[in-house]
C-alpha cells in the first residue's frame, strides 16, 4: 500500500486537514488507493464483482446485526423467534428475506469472481498471496453460511446440522473432539444452536478483516486484466476514480435489481419448504439437501462410498483451489490466448454446474455414477490438465500492450488521465 500511497496527488487544503493528515494520513491513503490508483484500461464487467461482494458483505453484516437483536438462540424458541421477526417486528420480513437471499447473491457473485480468476489467470505470480486470501475468504463464507442455515431451526436446518456434524466425526484423531465441541453434548440440541449462533455472528467480522488484507494485497501487486499482461506505461492505465468506480456502481445497481426481485417476488425460491416446519428429531426429511451453493461439494461427498474418503474429497475440492498458482505451468495468464486450455476451462465450468445439479438429486442409480465421473474430472482438471496443458500448449500471440487491446495495433490515444509516472510502480510489480 505504501508504494501506491507514494503516487498520491492528494494535498490537504485547510489547516485542520493538514494537521490531521500529518498525524494520520487516512484521507491520503483512501485517495491513493481508491481515487488515483492506476487500473488497466481494458477491464471488463467481470472485474466489478469485487465491489459487488464488498457491498453484499456490508448488507449481510447490517441485516445480521438487526436480526440478532430479535433472535433467540435456543432450541425451544429459535423457530418461534424467526416467525416473530417475520410477523411482529417492523420490516422484520424485509430484514430476514434480505439476509437469506443476500447469502445466495453473495455466493453467486463469489462464484463468478472465482471463475473469472481461473479464466484470466489472476492467481499467477505475483498475485499468489492475493489469491490465497481470496480462498480463505471463500472458506470463511462457507462456514458462515452453513452456520446461518441452521439457525431458523426448521427441519432442514436441524437435519443439515446433524448430517454435517456427523460427517466431521469421520476425521481421524480429532473428529470426535470437533463433533463434541460443536454439539456441546451427546447430540444436536440447545448448546449446539447457541454455539452456531455465536460463531455465525463472529465469522463475518473475520471475513471483513481478511477482505481488508485482500484489498491491501491487490493494491500492492496491481490488478490483472483480460489480456493478462502488465501495465507498461501511463497510457495502459486510467485512474480508479472515476473510470472503475462508475463501472462498479453501475454493476452493483444492476445486481441489486436482481437481489430486489428475489426479495419482493421470489423470497423463498432459493430456500427449502421443509425449513418452515419446526425441527423434529423424530422425523427425518425424505431428502436432506444443503443450500444450492454447497450442492457441488455435497455431490462429491456422496459420490464416494467410504465416509472418510467422501469427507477428504469434499474438503479437498475446496482446498485444491489454493494450489492453482503452482499447478498451472503456463507462462500465459489469460485463457483468451490459450486455445487448448480454454476448451478445458469451459468443460470444467460445465462439470461444476453438473455437480451442483447432481447434488440436488437422490443418491441412487445413474446419479451416483454421474457424480463419480464428474468428481474424477474435477480433480483431474487441477492435477492433470493444468500441469500438462501448460507444458505442451502453443499460446496465441500476446498484444504488445494493454493499450493495443483497446485501440488495436499501431493506434494511439491522446492521453490517459494518469499523472506522469503514476503507473510506473504497478508496471514494475506486475
Image (spheres, helix red, strand yellow):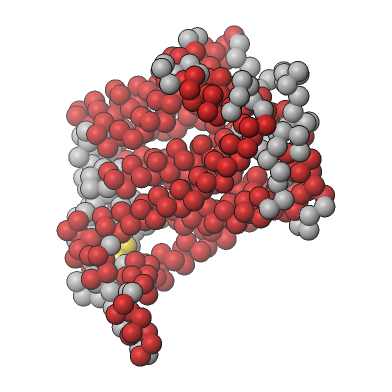
Task: Using the image, determine if residue 124 lies above or below residue 343.
Answer: below
Quadrant of the snapshot with the C terminus = bottom left
**Res 134 visible:** yes
> In the figure, is residue 221 to the left or right of 304?
left
Residue 401 is situated, as x and y percent measured from the top left of the image, at 22, 57
Q: Nearer the viewer, residue 243 or 398?
A: 243
Q: Residue at x 44, y 18 (%)?
A: 171
Residue 411 is situated, as x and y percent measured from the top left of the image, at 24, 65
**Image quadrant assignment for residue 243:** bottom left
Residue 409 is situated, as x and y percent measured from the top left of the image, at 23, 59
Q: Residue at x 43, y 21 (%)?
A: 174
**Image quadrant assignment for residue 12:** bottom left
Quadrant of the snapshot with the N terminus = bottom left
Task: Using the image, determine if residue 165 lies above or below residue 306.
Answer: below
Q: Residue at x 30, y 33 (%)?
A: 323
Please identify the residue farthest to the right as the structure is shown. 88
**Res 52 visible:** no
Amino acid at each position: 500500500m505504501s508504494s501506491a500511497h507514494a503516487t498520491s496527488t492528494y494535498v490537504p487544503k485547510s489547516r485542520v486537514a493538514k494537521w490531521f493528515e500529518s498525524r494520520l494520513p487516512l484521507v491520503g491513503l483512501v485517495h491513493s488507493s481508491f481515487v488515483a490508483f492506476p487500473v488497466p484500461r481494458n477491464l471488463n464487467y467481470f472485474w466489478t464483482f469485487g465491489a459487488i461482494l464488498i457491498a453484499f458483505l456490508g448488507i449481510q453484516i447490517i441485516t445480521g446485526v438487526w436480526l440478532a437483536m430479535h433472535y433467540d438462540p435456543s432450541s425451544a424458541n429459535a423457530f418461534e423467534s424467526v416467525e416473530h421477526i417475520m410477523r411482529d417486528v417492523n420490516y422484520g420480513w424485509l430484514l430476514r428475506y434480505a439476509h437469506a437471499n443476500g447469502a445466495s447473491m453473495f455466493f453467486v457473485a463469489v462464484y463468478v469472481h472465482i471463475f473469472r480468476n481461473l479464466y484470466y489467470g489472476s492467481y499467477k505470480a505475483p498475485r499468489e498471496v492475493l489469491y490465497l486470501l481470496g480462498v480463505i475468504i471463500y472458506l470463511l463464507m462457507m462456514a458462515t453460511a452453513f452456520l446461518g442455515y441452521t439457525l431458523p431451526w426448521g427441519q432442514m436446518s436441524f437435519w443439515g446440522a446433524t448430517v454435517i456434524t456427523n460427517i466431521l466425526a469421520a476425521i481421524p484423531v480429532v473428529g470426535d473432539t470437533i463433533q463434541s465441541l460443536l454439539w456441546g453434548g451427546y447430540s444436536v440440541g440447545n448448546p449446539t444452536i447457541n454455539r452456531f449462533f455465536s460463531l455465525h455472528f463472529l465469522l463475518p467480522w473475520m471475513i471483513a478483516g481478511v477482505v481488508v488484507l485482500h484489498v491491501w494485497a491487490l493494491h500492492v501487486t496491481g490488478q490483472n486484466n483480460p489480456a493478462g499482461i502488465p501495465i507498461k506505461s501511463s497510457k495502459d492505465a486510467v485512474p480508479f476514480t472515476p473510470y472503475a468506480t462508475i463501472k462498479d456502481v453501475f454493476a452493483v445497481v444492476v445486481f441489486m435489481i436482481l437481489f430486489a426481485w428475489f426479495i419482493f417476488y421470489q423470497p423463498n425460491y432459493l430456500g427449502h419448504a421443509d425449513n418452515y416446519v419446526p425441527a423434529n428429531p423424530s422425523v427425518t426429511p425424505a431428502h436432506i439437501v444443503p443450500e444450492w451453493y454447497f450442492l457441488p461439494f455435497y455431490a462429491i461427498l456422496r459420490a464416494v462410498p467410504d465416509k472418510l474418503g467422501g469427507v477428504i474429497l469434499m474438503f479437498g475440492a475446496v482446498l485444491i483451489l489454493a494450489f492453482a498458482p503452482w499447478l498451472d505451468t503456463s507462462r500465459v495468464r489469460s485463457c483468451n490466448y490459450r486455445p487448448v486450455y480454454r476448451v478445458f476451462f469451459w468443460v470444467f465450468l460445465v462439470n461444476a454446474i453438473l455437480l451442483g445439479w447432481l447434488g440436488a438429486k437422490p443418491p441412487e442409480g445413474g446419479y451416483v455414477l454421474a457424480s463419480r465421473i464428474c468428481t474424477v474430472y474435477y480433480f483431474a482438471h487441477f492435477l492433470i490438465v493444468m500441469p500438462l496443458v501448460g507444458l505442451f500448449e502453443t499460446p496465441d500471440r500476446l498484444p504488445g500492450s494493454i493499450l493495443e487491446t483497446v485501440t488495436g495495433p499501431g493506434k494511439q490515444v491522446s492521453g490517459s488521465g494518469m499523472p506522469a509516472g503514476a503507473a510506473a510502480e504497478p508496471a514494475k510489480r506486475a
